Image: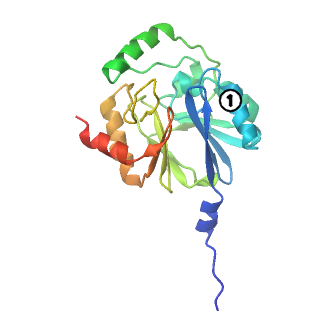
Amino acid sequence: MGVAQITPEWIFKMTFTFHRIPVGICNCYLLRGERTILIDAGAWDGMPAFLSEMKKLNIDPKQIDLILLTHGHWDHITNLNDIHEMTGAKVAIHGRDQFMVETGEPLFPAGATPYGRMMSWASKRLLRPRLPKVKVDLVLDDNGMSLAEYGIPGKVVHTPGHSMGHSCVILDSGEAFVGDTAMNSWFLRLTPGLPVLAEDIKMVVDGWRKILPMGIKRVFPAHGRDFPVEVMQKEIENFK
């Protein structure tokens, strides 16, 4: 009888895990392969929750090697400086959103629906975040990047529209961490679907048309719980 061979690809997949970490109103996601990546850095009042979740997972924050930002809006970067100082991790974001991180003055997106336009109008007048400036270590371009060097089976894909530098993370196993290209939280929309806020909603839809063929099975938004990709397939098919 021959001896079964365990392929490097099998080992690669078996050593990868991910976790959702709610940080304020924003979901961050911890990807753990040979190295560890944190997607986004959360919103105001989120640090206690971040530290609590890391303790529950029995993970030392210093194990985080990269903070990968889906985009530069305030609710995704508010705790960036604290987490960056705590971990010593590098910071990565697309070049179109780099200025929001390095100036500490993120923009608020336009509305893509009547409710979104009302929210955008009010928020631009009430929310004027002035955050610590953080130097970006890794500036992403439109080609995105592979996560293979971190032992993580996936890639970063540029998906502009919500912001011009928005990116998603697509795993080979079918999970998609989509930032704000989809939303599923009660204060934004009652059912999962396209964002109510976007600089250009048609670009958001084009981004979905780009990533849907990549084998996505489940969608993990920054706001709200995950849901099956069929929801977005229907949204995109029905978009006018």
Q: Amino acid at mark 1?
A: Ala
Q: Quadrant of the C terminus?
A: top left
Q: State the image quarter where residue 186 is shown.
A: top left
Q: Secondary structure under badge 1?
A: helix
| Scheme by which the image is coloured | rainbow
Mark 1 residue crowding within 10 angstroms, few (<14) / some (14–19) / many (20+): some
166 left or right, relative to 19: left
Tell me: residue 150, above or below residue 186.
below
Residue 158: x and y in percent read: 44, 40
Pick out the residue farthest to the left. 240
Q: Is residue 186 or residue 88 the one in the foreground?
A: 186
Question: Which residue is depicted at the point 61% across and 72% down?
Answer: 7
Question: Which residue is depicted at the point 68% across and 32% down?
Answer: 50
Q: State the image quarter where residue 139 is shown.
A: top right
Question: Which residue is depicted at the point 42% across and 35% down?
Answer: 182
Residue 76: x and y in percent read: 56, 28
Residue 37: x and y in percent read: 63, 43
Residue 221: x and y in percent read: 48, 37
Q: Quadrant of the N terminus?
A: bottom right
Q: Which residue is mark 1?
A: 49
Tell me: residue 55, above or below residue 115.
below
Q: State the image quarter where residue 105 is shown.
A: top right
